[in-house]
């Protein structure tokens, strides 16, 4: 939820103007739903509530949200059992959201920023991974990249929200300790996002500064674009960035957001090319490539299907989502218990309730094939951290008539 919130807020901060008068309030409403929750989860000093519900018991049942009767156990990190990565990501979400609400709700924005600073201080002062502090986290939500990237990510957003150079110094001092060329970007790894976010500041300072963010962001571009001599990405035959992981669509969506955003920053600084080992890459190519990934996701692919539910003539019908796959309360008012939902989970029939707009996990084997099987969580489960950066991508493309 925290990373989703950060990315939706970033989408609004950069591209809210392209969302139009009707859609921007919807985006802010979605952010506020999350930030209200995160504010409650961080209301005690040096305590962050990170999860509600035992993942093992919840995954053991297939129930509608209205019928859930599994234990609503709450889990926290604190001074004796810290969780720097989850706390710092919440700090990033609150700081980013404070920028999104700065004009429309200045008092709320100020409260978000104050809390972000408090939560970041806790994350930085009491360092450890929530993998070790909260036994319920793994194997479902393990952090594999370490907590250092989240600390820098949180500091970067605090700098963007406050212009306090102490936060910039914190990131500058530590960025090259964690940065590796071609680093990914997603809910677990923030490496590439940190550099793109702060490249805007470095670009505005001109070429005389020694900040590493521009060169690191350039390295990211060179590692992603297929024509670059330094490209490290794998692509499906249909042209989608592919990395075998639980939700393969996260990589193309998140990296495309970064490419568009970096291209925007480069354009603002009048820079037109990136040097990839002697090959000049036009900044316009970043937009073109990101658009190709969006087009693939929305139907221009070998399956001729959209990976956004409800969009186009052909889209996933059997997504792994309880509320979508089980009958509605109106259609079936009787209680559906823990195991009573199993036949619906295993059914080959399409979901009765269409979750319009949801993005699913994507192709499963690098060959552009999508099984459309509810049991296949990695491919058929919709996740919010796909939709959040996709909002920014679509807003940019809409505003720029691509």
Image (tube, grey):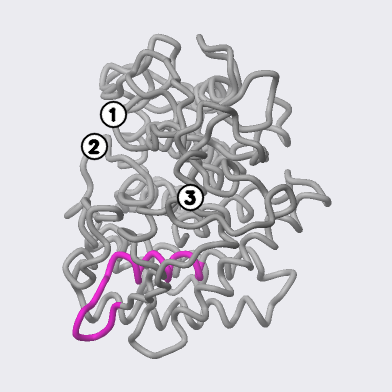
Q: Nearer the viewer, residue 387 or 138?
A: 138
Q: Which residues are magenta?
A: 77-95
Circle 1/circle 2 CB separation < 8 Å? no
**x and y, in percent, of residue 18 in the image:** 73, 44
Q: Main secondary structure of the magenta part?
A: helix
Of badges 1 and 2, the one in the foreground is: 1
**Which residue position holds label 3?**
340
**Which residue position holds label 1?**
244
Circle 2/circle 3 CB separation < 8 Å? no
Near mark 1 (Cα within 10 A), the count class, few <14, some 14-19 or many ≥20, is: some
Quadrant containing the C terminus in the rendered view? top right
As measured in the structure, the alpha-carbon distance from the residue carrying label 2 to the one carrying label 3 is: 49 Å
Near mark 2 (Cα within 10 A), the count class, few <14, some 14-19 or many ≥20, is: some
Q: Which residue is rendered at x = 37% and y = 35% of the image?
A: 378
As measured in the structure, the alpha-carbon distance from the residue carrying label 3 to the one carrying label 1 is: 33 Å
**Which residue position holds label 2?**
181
> Is 315 located above or below residue 18 in the figure?
above
Q: Is residue 383 magenta?
A: no
In the drawing, does residue 362 fall left or right of residue 66?
A: left
Asked which secondary structure carries label 1, the reply is: loop
**x and y, in percent, of residue 345 in the image:** 47, 39
Q: Which residue is rendered at x = 23% and y = 58% of the image?
A: 138
């Amino acid at each position: 939820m925290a990373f989703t919130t950060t990315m939706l807020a970033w989408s609004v901060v950069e591209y809210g103007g392209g969302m139009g008068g009707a859609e921007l309030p919807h985006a802010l409403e979605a952010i506020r739903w999350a930030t209200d929750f995160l504010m409650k989860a961080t209301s005690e000093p040096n305590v962050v509530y990170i999860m509600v519900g035992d993942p093992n018991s919840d995954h053991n049942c297939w129930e509608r949200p209205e019928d859930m009767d599994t234990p609503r156990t709450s889990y926290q990190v604190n001074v004796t059992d810290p969780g720097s990565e989850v706390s710092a990501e919440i700090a990033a979400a609150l700081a980013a959201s404070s920028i999104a609400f700065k004009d429309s709700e200045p008092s709320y924005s100020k409260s978000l920023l104050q809390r972000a600073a408090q939560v970041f201080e806790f994350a930085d002062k009491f360092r450890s991974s929530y993998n070790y502090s909260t036994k319920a986290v793994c194997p479902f939500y393990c952090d594999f990249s370490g907590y250092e990237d989240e600390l820098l990510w949180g500091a970067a957003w605090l700098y963007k929200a406050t212009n306090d150079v102490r936060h910039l110094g914190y990131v500058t001092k530590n960025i090259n300790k964690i940065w590796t060329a071609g680093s990914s970007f997603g809910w677990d790894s923030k490496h590439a996002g940190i550099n793109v976010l702060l490249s805007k500041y470095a670009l505005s300072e001109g070429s005389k500064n020694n900040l590493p963010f521009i060169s690191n962001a350039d390295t990211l571009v060179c590692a992603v674009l297929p024509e670059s001599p330094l490209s490290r990405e794998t692509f499906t035959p249909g042209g989608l960035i592919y990395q075998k992981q639980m939700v393969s669509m996260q990589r193309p969506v998140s990296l495309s957001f970064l490419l568009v955003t970096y291209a925007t920053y480069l354009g603002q600084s009048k820079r037109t090319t990136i040097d990839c080992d002697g090959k000049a890459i036009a900044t316009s190519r970043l937009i073109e490539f990101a658009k190709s990934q969006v087009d693939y996701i929305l139907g221009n692919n070998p399956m001729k299907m959209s990976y956004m539910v409800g969009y186009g003539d052909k889209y996933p019908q059997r997504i792994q989502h309880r509320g979508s796959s089980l009958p509605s309360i109106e259609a079936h008012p009787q209680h559906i218990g823990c195991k009573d939902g199993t036949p619906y989970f295993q059914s080959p029939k399409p979901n009765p309730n269409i979750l319009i707009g949801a993005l699913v996990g994507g192709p499963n084997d690098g060959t552009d094939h999508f099984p459309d099987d509810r049991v296949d969580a990695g491919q058929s489960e919709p996740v919010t951290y796909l939709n959040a950066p996709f909002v920014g991508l679509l807003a940019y493309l809409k505003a720029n008539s691509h």
